[in-house]
Amino acid sequence: MLRSLITGLAAAALLAGCGSATPTGAALRVAASPAAPATPPATPPATSPAGSPTAPTPAAPSAAVPGSVQSLEAAYERVITDVLPSIVQINTKVGLGSGIVYDAGGHILTNAHVVGKATKMTVTTAGGGPSRPARLVKAFEAGDLAVVKVDDPRGLRPARFGDSSKLRVGQIVLAMGNPLGLSGSVTEGIVSALGRTVTEPQNPDSTGATISGAIQTSAAINPGNSGGALVDLSGQVVGIPTLAALDPDLGGGAAPGIGFAIPSNTATDIAGQIVKQGKVTNSHRAAIGIEGSTIIGSDGRPSGVGVARVLKGGGAEKAGIRAGDVIVSVNGTQTPTMAALAETLAQLKPGEQVKIEVRHADGSTSTVAVTLGELSGD
């Protein structure tokens, strides 16, 4: 159930909610490691008023270092003790993944690809005990999020969700989940970057989820981590670990230290709508109003998005786009694939007007103005 994703500059693999350790799909081409920072020049010795060097200041006692280490260890232990009871393992007939206890009513937040096509599954807490039957409430596949509900919520501890908009690059985070079926595992890292846009290409097991504003982290994310928690040192969930990169130079193996998480603000907004209304009523995502697929040109390379169907009442229909047309760019940004189109739209808002270049069946091209609609939650 491993899948792949595509970033703006490269491709990566999407970890599915299964225990398989062999990634498949597209791979991420990574740049060579940057050179290690140069060693800063030594501070010149201080001089006396007469200009002669004074004795160097003694180094601080090394005993201070263990104290700092112990303090950090204590913070880790405190966070793990507090949050791990809110992390569960989700098992379907075809694989496993992770989830987070969303509320006291037994709602569990996870990735849509963890549940896949399943409507029934079992949930096990990190502390063990018997598995609990659960059912799918709703999946929002376009954003790779889903909510399931256990039949018996007794003893489940809801997690505390933080404000992901306040995250800083360099902040320490812990990833909690069930990688390779190892229940209640924890890895650590930092927030490596913010605001990434990553897209999973379409395949039989996926509709091609696009995540905007993704958190990049160096915390290890392995198969089975999907749907778990990315946690800060205050014990708040700030993201949902979802994606990990593959490096072709490693034979398609995992690219060390490159993983992606859905921001908690996005996840809780979608989960809240599903819990309260049973579906996503406001995706906050822009859409053209078509169904399509990547077109391969005569040179064997992707050349645009072929329009298979125009949705009634959508922006594309109103702008005169028809089935058989090929979308080649949006606001001047080339869209050779469905993934590229999804990434471009993920950075726009419903209601915005964009210029879309279209290639017609007779080979002619035209540019039309399209007012973007909202991506459906179904």
Image (cartoon, helix red, strand yellow):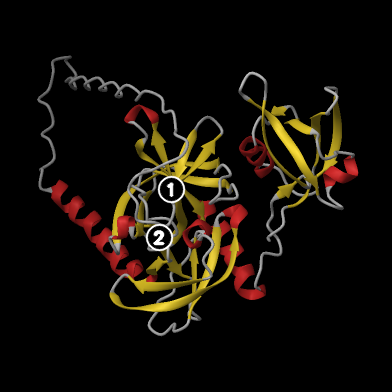
**Residue bearing mark 1:** 2
Q: Is residue 61 above or below residue 49?
A: below
Q: Local crowd at mark 1 within 10 Å, few (<14), some, or many (≥20)?
A: many
Question: Which residue: 47% across, 82% down?
Answer: 151
Furthest-top residue in this view:
51
The reply to whether residue 330 is in sight is no
Q: Position of residue 271 (x, y in %)?
A: 58, 66
Q: Residue 186 falls in which quadrant of the image?
A: bottom left
Q: CA distance from mark 2 to mark 1?
A: 10 Å
Q: Which of the pair 136/260 is nearer the observer?
A: 136
Q: How many marks?
A: 2
Q: Local crowd at mark 2 within 10 Å, few (<14), some, or many (≥20)?
A: some
Question: Which residue: 22% across, 56% down?
Answer: 73
Judged left or right of residue 149, residue 59 is left
Q: Which amino acid, mark 2?
A: Gly
Q: Position of residue 74 (x, y in %)?
A: 23, 61
Question: Which residue: 83% across, 43% down?
Answer: 316
Q: Residue 244 falls in which quadrant of the image?
A: top left
Q: Which of the pair 353/255 is nearer the observer?
A: 255
Residue 139, numbered circle = none
Q: Which amino acid, mark 1?
A: Leu
Question: Which residue: 38% across, 83% down?
Answer: 155
Q: Earlier along the polypeptide chain: callout 2 or callout 1? A: 1
Q: Which of the pair 376/230 is nearer the observer?
A: 376
